[in-house]
Image (cartoon, rainbow, N blue to C red):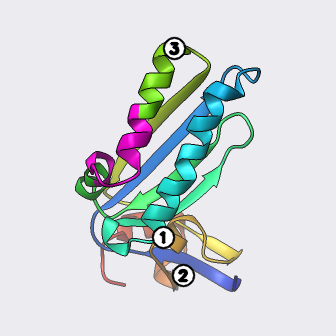
Amino acid sequence: MIVNPGRMTHDHDGELVVFLVGMRINRWSRPDLWWPTLTAMPPMMRELAGDPASGMLAQRLFGFPRSPTVLQYWTSVEKLYAYASDRDASHRPAWAAFNRRARDARGAVGIWHETFSIARAESIYVGMPPTGLGAATSLKPVTARLDRARQRFDAEGDPV
């Protein structure tokens, strides 16, 4: 990855959705109950990464070992929910399988998600390759007009 030596900020106009989804292994002694949940996420991530029309801009997996979490950036809430309910996509069968297992193994593994529709966002990347929101959208140099975090936040959506 190419490191941008200067000060950069993200560049994005339009709707932006941040989606966090994760799991928590509550009973390490029961991999038969948490392993299927853990292994259900990579196929979904590959499926979304291979489909630019899905609306998923970028994603990152972190939080191992107990609480694997995926951070995703989406172009709209509608596209996120369309993927979640698509009968031909990987999510629906994985969700149904989790619910079946959860009935028989209450508390062995937990899952969660949070969805945020973002009206404005501020970012700074110094000596970094494209990361986070900057990798999900695009980057632009920080100019004198956007030197401070407050300036970048207040200018979000304004022409630069």
**On-image quarter of the C terminus:** bottom left
Residue 147 occupies quadrant: bottom right
* Contact, mark 1 vs mark 2 (Cβ under 8 Å): no
Q: Amino acid at mark 3?
A: Asp
Above or below for 126 versus 35: below
For the point 71% across and 22% down, the residue is 30
Q: CA distance from mark 3 to mark 1?
A: 38 Å
Residue to which mark 3 is pinned: 104
Q: Secondary structure at mark 2?
A: loop
The earlier-in-sequence mark between 3 and 1 is: 3
Q: Which marked residue is nearer to the observer: mark 2 or mark 3?
A: 3
Viewer-proximal residue among 128 and 21: 21
Mark carried by residue 14: none
Q: Amino acid at mark 2?
A: Val
Residue to which mark 2 is pinned: 142
**On-image quarter of the N terminus:** bottom right
Residue 142 visible in image: yes
The residues colored magenta run: 83-96
Q: CA distance from mark 1 to mark 2?
A: 18 Å
Residue to which mark 1 is pinned: 136
